Every structure is written in C-alpha cells, then in structure tokens.
Image (cartoon, grey):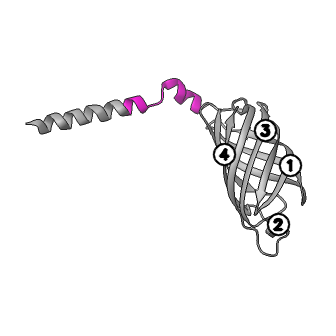
Amino acid sequence: MRRPFVLFGSAVVLLTLMLVALPTSSTRAKDSNFSNQDLRGAYVAQGTGTAAFPPAHPFSVLNGPMATTGRFVADGCGNISGFAVQVNNGAVGRQSFTGTYNVEGDGSFSVTMIGDTAFGTLAVEYSGVLFDEGKQAKVTEVGIPGVLPQGLAGITYIGSFIRQ
C-alpha cells in the first residue's frame, strides 16, 4: 500500500523542483530582448584552446596548446578595448586590442578584436552567447580574416567573459 504514496510523493517533489527551476517571466522576456547595451562595462576574459595551423603556414610556430587571460571594457554601443596575456605553445605575449561587437536579440553576439602581434596587426573574430542578463558570456574563436580562408579558424578556442 505504500507504493502509490511513494510514487505520488516522488511526483510532487519532481514537479516542485521543475517549477522552482523555471525562469520567471521577466527573465524569459529579458533573454529574448538583448542588445549592444547588454554587453557593457568591464569584463574579465579567459579561455583555452589549441592552435593548429597548416604546417607551411607562418603561424604554425604557434601550434599547440594555448591559454588567454585578459580584461576589456565594452561601451554598450558596439566598441571594446582591452588587453590580453596569451600563452601559445609555451611562448608568452601581452597585447592591447580594440574592436567592435554586435549583440543580437537572442543574446548571440559577434566580436572582432584588432591588435598588434608578432605577425603584425591582426583582426580575430569571435562568436558567443550572453547569459545572466549580460553579466556572463561563452565565446569561441571563429576566424582570423586575411590569414586563413573564411570558415577556417586555425585555432580551437573556448572561453568566457564575466562582468566585474
């Protein structure tokens, strides 16, 4: 006779957990109305990945593991500036960058960062998704224009931004 009570009790607990986990209506509305204003303020950025350029490519000296830590400021209007410390296959470098970004209504965004490197001035493109009302983001590198054909990044990189 205890079995129906255990099943009913389990169902009530599961339903309660599901209701607690559901976002509020204001959160759902916010998550579908992002704009450039949602990426504003100072952020720390960190990521890891692997550089894998073709062997004959000048950037192939960077092939191997990589890690980046930095800070940037987004103005809420599509402009960023900051710095990053990057380790590529054991070589450490620091660079300053500026750039632009665009946030879509669903929270997805694109960023182009432009900075001086040992290979000259380069633009690096990233795509990502904002969450937690723009306080955090997940990001991946998607290309280096003029270095590799479109659609090839040369680097597998996953990172995050957290508003300070």
* Residue receiving disc 4: 128
**Which residues are the magenta region?**
18-32
Q: Position of residue 155 (x, y in %)?
A: 72, 61
The CA distance from mark 3 to mark 4 is 15 Å
- Answer with mark 3 or mark 4, whichever residue precedes in sequence: 3
Residue at 86 percent of width and 54 percent of height:
122
The kind of residue tagged 1 is Gln
* Residue receiving disc 3: 72
Residue at 82 percent of width and 36 percent of height:
79
- Answer with mark 2 or mark 4, whichever residue precedes in sequence: 2
Q: Main secondary structure of the magenta part?
A: helix
Mark 3, other Cα within 10 Å: few <14 / some 14–19 / many ≥20: many
- Above or below for 89 versus 12: below
| Location of residue 72 by image quarter | top right
* Residue receiving disc 2: 59
Helix, strand or loop at label 4? It is strand
| Location of residue 76 by image quarter | top right
Mark 2, other Cα within 10 Å: few <14 / some 14–19 / many ≥20: some
Q: The C terminus lies in which quarter of the figure?
A: top right
- Above or below for 154 versus 96: below
Q: The N terminus lies in which quarter of the figure?
A: top left
The CA distance from mark 2 to mark 4 is 24 Å
